[in-house]
Image (cartoon, grey):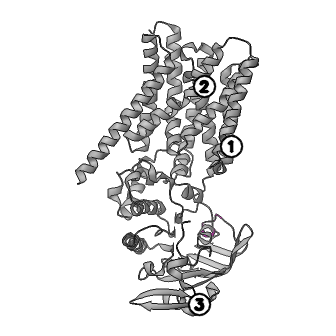
Amino acid sequence: MLEYEFMRNAFMAGGAVAVVCGAVGFFLVLRHLAFAGHALSHVGFAGATGAVLVGAPPLWGLLAFTLAAGIAMGLIGERLRGRDVAVGIILSLSLGLGVLFLYLYTGHAAQATAILFGNVLGVGQSALASLFGLSLASLCALAVLSRPLLFASLAPELAQAKGVSLRLVSVLFLAVVAVAVAEAAQVVGVLLVFALMIGPAAASARLTTHVGRGVGLAVLLALCETWAGIALAYATDWPATFWIVSVSCAIYFAAALASSLRSQRAAAAKL
Amino acid sequence: MSAYAVELDCVAIARGNRVVLSEVSAAIRPGEFVGVFGPNGAGKTTLLHAILGLIRPANGSIRVFGSEPQRGNPEAGYLPQQRAPAGDLRLRGLDFVASAVRGERWGPALPGRTGWRDAKRAIAMVEAQELAERPLSELSGGELQRLLLAQALLGRPRLLLLDEPLISLDPHFQQTIVALVRRVQQSEGITVLFTAHEVNALLGAMDRVLYLGSGHARLGTVDEVITGDVLSTLYGAPIEVLRVDGRIVVVSGHGLVEADAHRHDA
């Protein structure tokens, strides 16, 4: 299947996106922010459709909206807690706006499907270059940020006393999350970003208690899930998004089962 | 070099519109174990935050080993009152402690060889080696408290600020934590400020008492400070102090002060 250029592009794009999603997802799970990525992708939908409307690449519209929303979430920070109604209504508004933009855009409906459910087999050369650039930038940012991010996530009060600016760390991290969301949406679509960002990280958290191995395993799982999904799509002609999400789901539940069996055995051994 | 570890001179601190401390003076010597008590809202946490440099006094001066309090001062170890949000994570104790090793610097979240060594040393100091490999989600409150204490001890601080480490612990675990802090304090020669709700838990471990109330404070031995006269002044209400079987019972006109007024969930 690698003789086709679109398959080579799909594997490269999926790989570049998966590495970022696995690493970013690990910290999202650590910070109990699993649904922040989901929320950001909904906001991104309005950006992507708006970009289509004005004739720009959807990736950049998506990125502009997720970045703005991510930075705003970081700045509002703690005050966001317990305001799920307000957040939900803003999310509905942005989905609604997306619907309006799609209605105003009279072109073909394939664009809408691609934004909502992803189209990794349709990634062209220029999109591939953009994804590589964004992946590289967000991995570099995460590498520099990860030490204070880990500290602030696990022991916020102590981190603050030691001079860490919790708000700055939060804003920078959510900006990286926004980039990852925009990238993930190219592969699995805005509706299914959760599966690619949180699935591998949550499975990894079930399988290891180490930070370093946790990040590594989340990246590895995200890569395997994405590539397996693309290969299965090629073999069956079913959508790649379906396969990626299914594999992610299966791996998560297998990991959850394995870890609960292990802790049962550990408890039994103690008796 | 200052003769005192912590020196408070006519310190006044306001939080918002509320004056928490109006005039507090006290001098704590290096190597002392000081129990910090007072009714709810008396400013125990506020005082620790001021010593850490997180809030500035509106008036008066604070000196920590002779210098202005400075946020991020490596000489001060801190165990915050708000519990770590990490208690439900399946992360092992060693990685939790190690996350605080020079965690304020930018860079990748890899502690490095010296970082792991420092984290293991701090864990050994609090005798928590058996917790290092266990996930946080399986630890009890007292076990988690030991790891937080290990984090506070990273970087070999000379001053340890412990904010309510006994809260929500069973009496048995309270005694273990107090004895542990006392051992570490003596072997390392650290100055300890230990806030608590109940004087009895710290009897025998602490050298002196800092009692806060009505914006003021009194520093002295248990016998000097825990008396009806002093506490009546600090509470602004008549207080009696009884001694029963070597334990101290503080009684106000409304009942037991220590047992009732001191329970809170903050």
User: Start and end of the magenta stretch?
Assistant: B50-54
Type of the residue with mark 1: Ala
Residue found at the far bottom of this picture? B229
Instruction: Count residues near mark 1 (Cα–Cα under 10 Å), then give few for <14, some for 14-19, many for 20+.
Output: few
Q: Disc 2 vs disc 3: which is toward the camera?
A: 3
User: Residue B222: percent from the left, percent from the top?
Assistant: 49, 87
Type of the residue with mark 3: Val
Q: Is residue A50 visible?
A: no
Nearer-N-terminus badge (1/2): 1
Question: On the picture, is A172 further left or further right than A19?
Answer: right
Element class at badge 3? helix
Residue found at the far top of this picture? A3
Name the chief secondary structure element in magenta.
Answer: loop
Taking depth in this image into account, of B47 and A66 the one nearest to the observer is A66
Question: On the picture, is A163 further left or further right than B108?
Answer: right
Please state, as top left, top right, bottom left or bottom right, where the C terminus of chain B lies in the image. Answer: bottom right
> Image quadrant of residue A127?
top right
Residue B51 painted magenta? yes
Q: Disc number at residue B55? A: none
Looking at the image, which residue is at 29% across and 46% down?
A264
Q: For the residues tagged 1 and 3, is the chain the same? A: no
Q: Disc number at residue A86? A: 1
Q: Considering only vertical position in the picture, is B6 above or below A177?
A: below
Q: Which residue is mark 2?
A: A133
Element class at badge 2? helix
Q: Which residue is mark 3?
A: B230
User: Residue B52: percent from the left, percent from the top?
Assistant: 60, 66
Looking at the image, which residue is at 55% across and 75% down?
B5
Element class at badge 1? helix
Q: For the residues tagged 1 and 2, is the chain the same? A: yes
User: Residue B47: percent from the left, percent from the top?
Assistant: 61, 72
Looking at the image, which residue is at 58% across and 93% down?
B229
